[in-house]
Amino acid sequence: MKTQAEQVIHSPTRNNGPSVHTIDPNMNAVIFGATGMVGAGVLVECLDDPRIKSVLVIGRNSCSVTHPKLRELLHQDLFDYSDIRDDLRNLDACFFCLGTSSVGKSEADYRRITFDLTIAAANSLINLNPSLTFCYVSGEGTDRTEQGRIMWARVKGRTENRVLDMAESAYVFRPGYIQPFKGVRSRFRAYRLMHSVLDPFYPLLNRILPKHVTTTENIGRAMIEVALEGYSNTILENRDINSFAAAT
């Protein structure tokens, strides 16, 4: 993994209102889901960004990355953080990228992994760091009414609603199709095959479907900017994510 920390990254100019939350640079961030495609992409951007002082990665398995400002904490019970409370202090931002497919799962099982696990982590982090900015990766098409016919969209919507109610500073990111960049790969063979097929066509997809297509790089950049500068909207769709990334 090559670092790009020597590059100076500037905050984007926005025309849709002032930011609602700001913190100083030299941010201490924690990432959940760094072994997944989105989380790995966010980790790359965090390690490359000179404004981020330290990165804590929490997960059941190692992300297999080493870096001077990275500390990894293997933790098997992601529903209970009582025994690692001291490790969760003095954090400025959480980039929560942990998730799973709903395929083959009952609503109860999917809700436990998607809603219960997310809220358990958010609750522990926010109690220890009241001013923490919590950035949650959701998905395009999420249903915040929690009443729709599509199961995953209802559960994601419930999770979004709860996260936004819990934290003084919380943001939801709703990417659609995500193209991995900078050597990031999906853990799943089917997704790797799909990306390898679509990779040559990504510029075309981005041009004809800009509201529905983004990259791991763009998500990482947008999350960092939102954590540092805030944003006037609490929910960022693809166009917001890409706009942030293009302005950095």
Image (cartoon, rainbow, N blue to C red):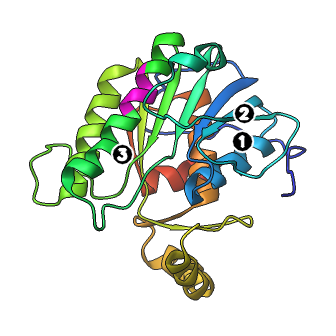
Q: In the depicted view, which residue is nearer to us: 210 or 121?
A: 121
Q: Residue at x 62, y 32 (%)?
A: 30
Question: Measured from the top left, where is residue 165 in percent x and y?
Answer: 29, 23
Give me the C-alpha separation between circle 3 and circle 2: 24 Å
Judge the density around disc 2: few (<14), some (14-19), many (≥20) Cα neighbours within 10 Å. Answer: many
Circles 1, 3 touching at the beta carbon (< 8 Å): no
Judge the density around disc 1: few (<14), some (14-19), many (≥20) Cα neighbours within 10 Å. Answer: many
Residue type at mark 2 is Val
Earlier sequence position, callout 1 versus callout 3: 1
The residue that label 2 is drawn on is: 55
Q: Residue at x 58, y 66 (%)?
A: 187
Give me the C-alpha separation between circle 1 and circle 3: 25 Å
Question: Measured from the top left, where is residue 97 in percent x and y?
Answer: 51, 46
Q: Residue at x 87, y 57 (%)?
A: 2
Question: Measured from the top left, where is residue 148 in percent x and y?
Answer: 11, 54
Q: Which mark is residue 21?
A: none
Residue type at mark 1 is Cys
The residue that label 1 is drawn on is: 46
Q: Residue at x 33, y 28 (%)?
A: 164
Circles 1, 2 touching at the beta carbon (< 8 Å): yes
Q: In the depicted view, which residue is nearer to us: 166 or 189?
A: 189
Q: Is residue 215 magenta?
A: no
- Which type of secondary structure does the marked residue at label 3 adopt? helix
Q: In the depicted view, which residue is nearer to us: 111 or 70?
A: 111
Q: Which residues are magenta?
A: 119-123
The residue that label 3 is drawn on is: 113
- Which type of secondary structure does the marked residue at label 2 adopt? strand
Q: Main secondary structure of the magenta part?
A: helix
Give me the C-alpha separation between circle 1 and circle 2: 7 Å
